[in-house]
Image (cartoon, rainbow, N blue to C red):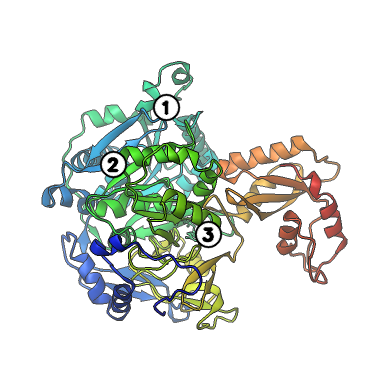
Amino acid sequence: MVVPESQGKMYHPPLELHRDAHVPDFSSYLVMYKRSLENPEAFWKEVADEFFWKKPATSPMLQYNFDVTKGNIFVKCMEGAKTNICYNVLDRHVREGNLGEKVAYYWEGNLPEHHTTITYGQLLSHSCRCANVLKQMGVKKGDRVSIYLPMIPELVYTVLACARIGAVHSVVFAGFSSESLCERIMDAKSSVLVTADGVYRGDKLINLKEISDEALEKCVEKGASSVARCLVIKHQALRTKTGASCNRLQTPWDSERDVWWDEAMSDSSEECEPEWLDAEDPLFILYTSGSTGKPKGVVHTVAGYLLYTFLTFKYVFDYQHHDVYWCTADIGWITGHSYIIYGPLANGATSVLFEGIPVHPHVGRFWEIIERYKVTKFYTAPTAIRLLMKYGQEPLQKYDLSSLRILGTVGEPINPEAWQWFYEVVGQSMCPVVDTFWQTETGGHVLTPLPAATPLKPGSATFPFFGVEPTILNEHGEEVEGEAEGYLVFRKPWPGIMRTVYENHERFENTYFKKFPGFYVTGDGGRRDKDGYFWITGRIDDMLNVSGHLLSTAEVEAALTLHPAVSEAAVVSRPHTVKGESLYCFVSLKDCKEFDKKMADELKRLVREKIGPIATPDFIQNAPALPKTRSGKIMRRILRQIARNEKDLGDLSTLADPKVVEVLFSQRSEATA
Ligand code: PRX
């Protein structure tokens, strides 16, 4: 890595940021980075000293094997230590830091008139009460609790309650279908489901309890009903909304299984002794799409995840105690786990917790919230930026955004146009944009600028975070030096990396460590430029990134082929101006079946039902046949080009029947959007 010079357009940190920054300049970053690699023991020990340990570690800070040829893959951080993450992110601040009165969250609902403030003291007492409710329901250390909730404070209470009693939380994004929820409950074998009666997403009322009941029925049908109790939150904001919409919600009820949150919480004690867990006990499972179609239960553990989310939050957003930080992600994804709950709370930060969507009830909603809470650090996704860019500058000009200091993006590559708009229009060319590359699996940021230290190049996630050692490999698994492009991999672990796939360690090893022994394989392509900057070039497996959400083509294909008329389906990505990528589906129908708009709509509905609205296909095209090699493998490269209408297809000699391509091009215009 070299100290970057101004080759091409670089954006340097504003001077006033250097003054109080934790990492004030690039040479400090280099010194700290070097130390984190050369002496990880001392580096991470210092971080661990910030926290409370019931019992100190008896082993080195990090132990690992990353080489499948030498035995099982494992990563351990602070083995032997005992702690509790809920204690560290709440009690420690309230008892030792005197932060009981400090605001932990400004909650802002789907509508601007619904908002509330939660202090650290309140967060602690609600989380303890919820922990006692869960205990009453029979939840013990190591049991799994599935959580299917909108972005309401009770979601945070429940997550922290699980962490407090050592239960493993498995949050399922509340936009997922009943089928997806069922699959995740069954895989985790959760004994409790926590959900809500319903939620408004924009104008749309979603009956979450009905979806939850469907999911639980499906679990029973599949012979795997582990859920004994269902805790249901009455979403107050729904109730305070006057008029018919409120009454529209019928909450189905099973009196043996279901319990209202309010009733259970009302006589629950605020005192709950934390369960002192081993450093390597599991903290949570979070499902992420797998290229075979079946989601993977990514497992994170207590101590390493605490250290890593704490430190990345502190340095990447240059956290200062007066900050008001806002991450617009949903807690159903890893970004919400790490950078709405654990990272900010571990630092004692004040965050905005937002339930709504960027364009409801008006397109200036984000800017209104920034003005209302005087947000200083703002973290969002490129897809949201591209959406808001479409409305121009006018909606922003109505609001005072002068509180902003640092901007951040996550989830997908950011195109230079969106970067410029974010930087110039939202940040008034005064706020660095931290483009953070990471994954559900990495637990926290792994490639990222540090705001006061790193000169920025739009679209580059720049350099590794402390303790992270990336490299680029070629097809043969050889490391390539200097300017290079290939597979982005990591040579050694950092504390927050995932430990296993839930109850499937073999899948963990096969997915991330088999291809190139000795390295963690991200599944992303990477490029290093002449200044040592890293650029993500996109997925190199059969995954798609729609609005920052990873989907596997196999998962969508499996949903499409459930339709009785479909014999085969192939799904590819097509660029989309807002979502980044969209789904373009080719379907072959069984004999005598007609393809028309009705059929296409049915197929789209089917995918929504099976996976959820995020997976809704944008295009469905009839494919009398699919382009295949002589050995029967679908050539997705060709389908991608057809979807994009790129006529220059190159070498087609490996195709069994090249005429198929012509037919698909000729029927392209009939694809149903
Ligand atoms: O392809 C990369 C893309 O999102 C993937 C991880 O998705 P997920 O596990 O859902 O976590 C998303 C939030 C951390 C990566 O493999 N990705 C994430 N951040 C970036 C990105 N691609 C380019 N630039 C980023 N900053």
Q: Distance between the residues labelled 2 and 3?
A: 29 Å
Sequence-earlier tag: 1 or 3: 1
**Residue named by callout 2:** 105
Quarter occupied by residue 364: top left
What's the CA distance linking mark 1 and mark 3? 45 Å
Secondary structure of residue under mark 3? loop
Which mark is in front, 2 or 3?
3
Residue at 40% across / 70% down in the picture?
Answer: 464
Is any part of residue 274 visible from this angle? yes
User: Is residue 146 placed above or below 554 in the rendered structure?
Assistant: above
Q: Residue at x 25, y 76 (%)?
A: 41
Tell me which residue sits at (50%, 79%) in the image. Answer: 530
For label 3, the crowd category at 10 Å Cα-Cα, with few meaning under 14, some 14 to 19 and many 20 or more, is many
Amino acid type indicated by mark 1: Asp
Residue type (three-letter) at the residue carrying disc 3: Pro
The reply, left or right, for residue 554 in relation to residue 478 is right
The reply to whether callout 2 and callout 3 are in contact (CB within 8 Å) is no
Between tags 1 and 3, which lies in front?
3
In this rendering, would 33 be left or right of 102? right
Give the amino acid type for the residue marked by disc 2 in the picture.
Tyr
Task: Rate crowding at label 2 as few (under 14), some (14 to 19) or many (20 or more) other CA atoms within 10 Å.
Answer: many
The dot on residue 413 is: 3
Say which of 319 and 227 sits in front: 319
Q: Is mark 3 within 8 Å of ligand 1?
A: yes
Q: Indicate the quadrant containing the C terminus: top left, top right, bottom left or bottom right.
A: top right
Mark 1, residue position: 254
User: From the viewer's perspective, is the residue at label 1 or at label 2 nearer?
Assistant: 2
Residue 621 locus on image (x, y percent): 76, 47
Spot occupied by residue 153 in the image (x, y as percentages of width and height): 32, 38
